[in-house]
Image (cartoon, rainbow, N blue to C red):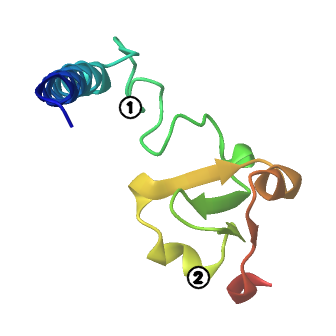
Amino acid sequence: MTWMTRIWIGLMMGTVLVLGVLLGRLWSEEATQADIVVKNVPSSEQMGNKEGGQDTNDKRKYVASRNGSKYYPQGCDALERIHKENRMYFATEKRAKQSGRELSELCK
């Protein structure tokens, strides 16, 4: 290899290195910026209810955990294990199933 070829390869490797660093910094800055900013969202208390904004108990026939894959009918003893802040409510069993959950074996 001639000295000109070695210099050319060195310059190309340096250019690739610098471009990689610059692109990496640009990408990391872009990833840390928030795309959506939500302002003035009313709390559940402001919506008229302390447990998620529902108005009446007839809209709460079925309950599920936000973190779980099962749903439970009202009155099931297993509901005591779900923290109130993690509860989701469904008016119908069809809606609970549409959410991708299945009826708990504990409450059949």
Residue for badge 1: 45
| Occupied quadrant, residue 65 | bottom right
Q: Secondary structure at mark 2?
A: helix
The reply, left or right, for residue 58 in relation to residue 20 is right
Between the C-alphas of marks 1 and 2, the distance is 26 Å
The quadrant of the picture occupied by the N terminus is top left
Q: Is residue 51 positioned above or below 105 on the image?
A: above
The reply, left or right, for residue 1 in relation to residue 65 is left
Percent position of residue 68, x then y: 57, 67
Percent position of residue 83, x then y: 41, 64
Q: Residue at x 88, y 54 (%)?
A: 94
Crowd band around label 1 with a 10 angstrom C-alpha radius: few (<14), some (14–19), many (20+): few
| Occupied quadrant, residue 11 | top left
Residue for badge 2: 77
Q: Secondary structure at mark 1?
A: loop
Q: Residue at x 46, y 77 (%)?
A: 81
